[in-house]
Image (tube, grey):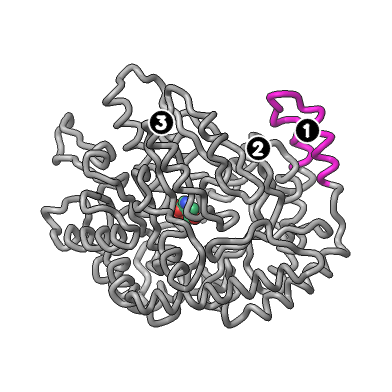
Amino acid sequence: MKIPKSGLSKEEIGARLSAVREGDVPWRSGKVWAYVYDAGRDVESVTKSAFMDFLTENGLDPTAFPSLLKLENEVVGAVASHLNAPETAAGTFTSGGTESILLAVKAARDRALSARPDLGRPHMVLPSTAHAAFQKAAHYLGLDVTIVPVDASYRADVAAMDEAITDRTVLLVGSAVSYAHGVLDPIEALGKLASDRGLLLHVDACIGGFVLPYFRRLGADLPPFDFSVPGVTSMSCDLHKYGFAPKGASVVLYRDAELRSHQFYACATWTGYTIVNAAVQSGKSGGPLAAAWAALKFIGDDGYMALSTKMYEATRKVCEGIEAHPDLHLLAAPDANLVAIASDTVDVFHVVDEMSRRGWTVQAQLTYGNSPANIHLSVNPRAVECVEELLADLDASVAAARGLPSGHVRSLVESLNAAAGDPPSRDAYQPLFDALGVDGGGLPDRMAPINEALDALPPSIREQLLIEFMGTLFTADRG
Ligand SMILES: *Cc1c(COP(=O)(O)O)cnc(C)c1O
């Protein structure tokens, strides 16, 4: 666009903004099982009003806005109690799971480098189910990573992680729970390994940290996964997932303040104002923090229990429905409200497209390691109202998927893979991308051929393709 010569009216702005959202997923419908964590209109109105109240306040400097310091200390304290952190624990409010993880990795790196300046490139050991944010952190912060295959239940293989430890290892990672399969890693065994080897252990509870204590109270048989396990030195827990705060809200916690101090950044070698940042952002809106505080206070323990009961029930019904289906199966029995569904008989990417045609938003997950292509469902509280409809539409989608062509792209990609050499060259794949029409910008009607191609490509080519695709989406529109 061009900056208009004279500004538009408030009404005109509102009308244009509502028109622009036409193509968005209808997240209030109950049929969006990813991206949005919806606790209903009441919570939405309270958190949005708190967000607006603090939108303009700046979290840059806690001495200028002591309100934000107080709110942050209260939110961090609430999450610390929820995860059984000791009195010595310290934490920080962040913009999301990725930032929490980035900071935990930075703290581990800088603590190790301060003790051993000649360490070289620090190294961390991840189960293949650990969130991609750890690899992103390694990429940003200059660490090496070893990705260790998980066992048949998609849980971390502790013995294999032990073998992957080197003299440069600074951090081990476990998930409570993993996003892809919703399962809890053996945190006690990982804690023992970390203690025995003198290493730090981060437990990523970004998605499970809020619900797991409630699921346990509802009868789920869950081993300890939080700071109650000796050896767990840091944790991440998102408020903008099942804390039901709006986006921009997570907490990173450390067993003690000394470890957290390696996360902080100060700079006194420039001419401007004093810089000391707890997290990645410097100037930042107080909105997400006030909204997260409001969610905790408004929903309360009883409210979270009621929401968790709905998610627990809905997950159980989804799992029963999938297990009874002749063409679908669960990849793992989930410990939380995240479900991965695979099939030996139909192409799951077609099933995802067919579900979209029926108004549902569910995520395709590609093959990696021992995890085959599958359909991911994040089971929200609203799901309890539409499980039967979901299962009926899944059944119809499976039937429709059976009639759709599959495998052409995959065999084309496999012959390309065989010819491409190591490392494969991007150019070799150009005809495939042309055929798929993925370089043209915008999204095609059906994603299955693209998902099928991505699924068959080596990960390094998948990554290149995704980055190029991103470049075609984000263009400066000067019209
Ligand atoms: C969502 C998620 C993250 C990343 O969080 P963002 O808020 O999307 O940055 C990390 N770990 C797990 C297990 C998650 O589910």
* Residue behind mark 2: 459
Q: Nearest the camera: 135 or 259?
A: 259
Q: Nearer the viewer, residue 356 or 252?
A: 252
Direction from residue 243 to residue 65 in the image, left or right: left
Q: Is residue 176 above or below residue 160?
A: below
Disc 3 marks a residue whose amino acid type is Arg
Which kind of residue does numbered mark 1 sit on?
A: Asn
Q: Residue at x 48, y 28 (%)?
A: 165
Type of amino acid at the residue the image marks with label 2: Pro
Q: Residue at x 75, y 45 (%)?
A: 453
* Outermost left residue: 63
Q: Which mark is residue 32?
A: none
For disc 1, does the CB lie below 8 Å from ligand 1? Answer: no
Which residue corresponds to mark 3? 197
Mark 3 near mark 1, Cβ–Cβ under 8 Å?
no
Spatial CA distance of label 3 from label 1 is 40 Å
Measuring from the top left, give residue 303's x and y in whole percent.
Answer: 38, 78
Residue 149 locus on image (x, y percent): 61, 39
SS for callout 2: helix
Q: Is residue 1 visible?
A: no
| Residue depth check, mark 3 versus mark 1: number of the one nearer the observer | 3
Rendering quarter of residue 31 = bottom right
Span highlighted in magenta in the image: 409-433
Left or right of 314 in this view: 413: right
| Secondary-structure class at tag 3 | helix
- Find the distance from the CA under tag 2 to the CA under tag 1: 11 Å
State which tag comes first along the sequence, 3 or 2: 3
Residue 417 has which mark?
1
